Image (cartoon, rainbow, N blue to C red):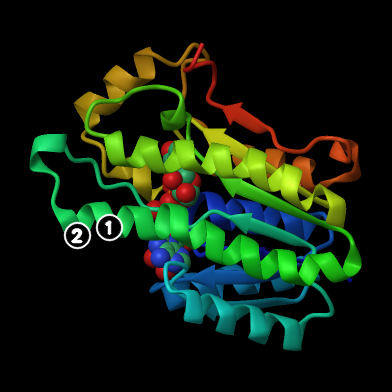
Amino acid sequence: MATAIVTGASRGIGKACALELAKAGYDIVVNYVSNEQAAGEVVKEIEALGRKALAIQADTADLKAVQAMFRTASKEFESIDVLVNNAGVVDDKFLLMLPEDSLERSLDINIKGYFHCAQNAALKMMRKKKGCIINVSSVSSVVAIPGQSVYSATKGAVNSMTATLAKELAQYGIRVNAVAPGFIKTDMIDQIPEEQKEEHLKAVPLGRFAEAEEVGKVVCALCSDAFAYVTGQTVIIDGGLSL
Ligand code: NAP
């Protein structure tokens, strides 16, 4: 039985990825950092689909916590076949009002967290000579939005790490790709004031924000054999925003 670890799967895009992968036949590790109840509900939804699921609390910025999560996952599941590096934070701040703790937290979760999980997953996948890592980036990696210098830098780093890791891990049969969502209806987007949301909407050629499931379906497709010859790519899912 194939297993996927999805970080930040208690809500939003991570939850949607977890559910789509479960529908595709994967057992799922539902990682979360603080929202135990929400993670538990995702586990129930996955079990209702006939798959095994386990919620594991771990702050992905904390290497020891990530190592412990992979140890637990390895005891409970036969193999780790897919990692979706999704847990991320946005904390919009203009450069001149950028607190050090906000900068550090964003770098720690959005970049270091992805490396921690990719490293631990690759160690497991290498043994099977097969695996798939999907990094959730953002359209902010290619579109400049004032206030998002830190966020966009972290997501640009995700695109670069994706390409380099793809080349590095290809010899072990591990594919590494990224998705770069535009505006997706999650708690993260709910933080944006309504007037600003309306402005952002005007820049989306398809004229709407996306459902999280629309990202989950692309992530799931990238993990499938249909994309067996695709690695190192960043797929933009933004309704045309970046065109
Ligand atoms: P969200 O609704 O805010 O959910 C964030 C998820 O990440 C939650 O499950 C949260 O767990 C988890 N999380 C946060 N910090 C964590 C940490 N240190 N360790 C482990 N888990 C952690 O976010 P989202 O909108 O779904 O975004 C998910 C990803 O998509 C992020 O990487 C984000 O940058 C990217 N993205 C989102 C959008 C968008 O429009 N929404 C657009 C582009 C890219 P708890 O529930 O326990 O707090």
Name which residue type carries label 1. Answer: Glu
Crowd rating for badge 1 (residues with CA inside 10 Å; few <14, some 14–19, many 20+): few
Q: Secondary structure at mark 1?
A: helix
The x, y position of residue 180, in whole percent, is 55, 34
Q: Residue at x 52, y 43 (%)?
A: 158
- Quadrant assignment, res 40: bottom right
Q: How many marks?
A: 2
Calculate the distance from the C-alpha at mark 1 to the C-alpha at mark 2.
5 Å
Q: Where residue 104 is drawn, which disc sits there?
A: 1
Tell me where residue 136 appears, x and y as whole percent: 55, 45
> Could one spot residue 47 in this view of the protein?
yes
Give the label on residue 82, or none: none
Place of residue 75 in the rendered image (x, y in percent of width and height, measured from the top left)? 74, 88
Determine which of the numbered discs, if any, sits on residue 101 in the image: 2
In this view, the residue in front, 213 or 160, is: 160
Left/right placement of residue 157 relative to residue 128 reads: left
| Nearer-the-camera pick, 171 or 4 | 171
Splitting the image into four quadrants, where does ligand 1 fall? bottom left
- Above/below status of 90 relative to 202: below
- Judged left or right of residue 26, residue 108 is left
Please say if the residues under marks 1 and 2 sit with CB atoms less than 8 Å apart: yes
Quadrant of the rendering where the N terminus is positioned: bottom right
Residue that extends furthest to the left in the rendered view of this protein: 97
Q: Which amino acid type is marked by label 2?
A: Asp
The picture places residue 37, in percent across and down from the top left corner, at 45, 76
At 33% from the left edge and 21% from the top edge, which residue is drawn? Answer: 200
Determine the image quadrant of residue 172: bottom right
Report the side of 202 relative to 55 (left or right).
Answer: left
